[in-house]
Image (cartoon, rainbow, N blue to C red):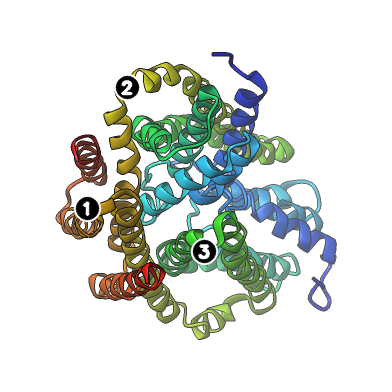
Amino acid sequence: MSAPPDSPLSAWVLLRVFLRSLFLQASWNPKGMQNLGLAYALFPALERLYPAGPAREEAVRRHLVFFNTHPYVAAAIVGGVVNHELRISRGEESPDKVVAFKAALMGPLAALGDGFFWLSLKPAVGAVSAALVPLLGVWAVPVFLVLYNLVHVLLRVRLYWLGLTLGDRLVEAVARANLPARGARLRTVAAACAGGLAAWLAVNFGANAGGAHAPLLAAGCLALGVASYVLVSRRVPNYVVLYLVAGLACAAGAFL
Amino acid sequence: MSVVWTQVALAGLWGGFVALERKAFLQAMLSRPLVASTVMGALLNDVPSGLAVGLLLELFFLGTANLGAALPENDTLAATGTSAAAATLTAATGAGSTPAIWSLAVLLFIGLGRVGRRGDRLLEGYTARLARVALSSAEAGNLTRAMRQNLWGMWPHFVLYGALTSLCALAGYFVEPLLEALPPAVVRGLAWAWPAMASVAAAIAAQGSHARRAPLYAALGAAAVTVAVVFVLLQEHR
């Protein structure tokens, strides 16, 4: 990681800001949400950009106001804020600009990050890795971590760098990544893998436990899966469905 | 029954660490049920229990997400607590890990997800106080103290969830007599319950995948796997 040209911020300071941004939610609180984490991440840069005294105190205070976005995509905002603070410290723009930059980006980037990482990548990698457990056993766990973090860490570093170098123009670069369309494909993968795993567990269960009843048990287990899907879709709590199925299976195991 | 205290302590340390990783630091998914449970199993010398519990809970909690200020169920606490209890229960029986043990542990400890959500809500009061201290410190010009408040937000998570996980590990030893007292038919029923619950958890996962046409894709996946498994089984029987 090298510093932008003419920057008083060394590569080490920029790296420290990035590493401290990993603690963005360490003190997540209902009022300011990620405000403490953001100020904490930015502090090494603000220390270099402003002399000790009122200027530095004011810079810290403007980042202790409400802030909330997706924790990974926040890297882009952290980079963008450093870019703005650099210009503010040189007198090239007013402090209002950085406040407006954060306010304008945190909502849309939160929606983008939630949609891609929490609602697409995480379920997809989780479902793929779970589906790999029958084939790979315990090795499905490192597969999970590698698959997920390859995307997570690379995007986090890239977004930080985009914010740092492009400032306001990072929006266009993020839009080019086309994350919503990729997310939709990942959700499809998650659904297919989960369905496949449900069938594998049901058929394998029938084969292992059933003896003469094998096809009946496997079909029964599959039917329970379909019924569970419908019940959960109709807002029956997941726990109720799980305990109901456990009760039925226990009864079947005890009496068949 | 003899409690192995090093196992109880190890369970607490791992439970506390992944509780931090879940939200406060990094979020590299070490705290996901599949990972957290399997590592817990490895730490407590019972990888099969950790993997089996982790697989089921990963699917059960696949659709949960921490969106905005909403607090989802604490899938990490459910995973570490359940796998720790399953591992110590296995150790207490002196025999190998079995589906009946996994089922019993899941049925007894899966509710920890809700306990964890209450814990998360409780700890928000503490972080709100830290935020107030940080703001007043910044107003007073003490910036170093203001910044330090961010890191103070982590220790209660480590202590609370580490302690709860340790308690679950300890509880595993005390559940063993209950398992021993169960009639063999019920133990057989519990053994059958594990694949049934896992299969249903996978169906819940398909519903929680947020895919636009999830039923279609899940059905296609299920059909493909069913045909493949039945084909393999028929080949084996020839």
Q: Identify residue for label 1.
A: A213
Position of residue A85 measured from the top left corner of the image (x, y, whole percent) = 68, 65
Q: Secondary structure at mark 2?
A: loop
Q: Quick one: which residue is furthest to the top in this view?
A: B1
Report whether A47 appears left or right of B26: right
Report whether A241 appears left or right of A35: left
Q: Chain of mark 3?
A: A
Q: Out of B130 and A70, give the one closest to the viewer.
A: A70
Whether residue A114 is visible, yes or no, is: yes
Mark 3–mark 2 Cα distance, whole angstroms, equals 33 Å
Position of residue B129 measured from the top left corner of the image (x, y, whole percent) = 52, 30
Q: Identify residue for label 2.
A: B182
For image coordinates 79% across by 71% down, the residue present is A1
Q: Identify residue for label 3.
A: A135
Disc 1 residue crowd, few under 14, some 14–19, many 20+, Cα 10 Å? few
The amino acid marked with disc number 2 is Leu
For image coordinates 41% across by 40% down, the residue present is B99
The amino acid marked with disc number 1 is His
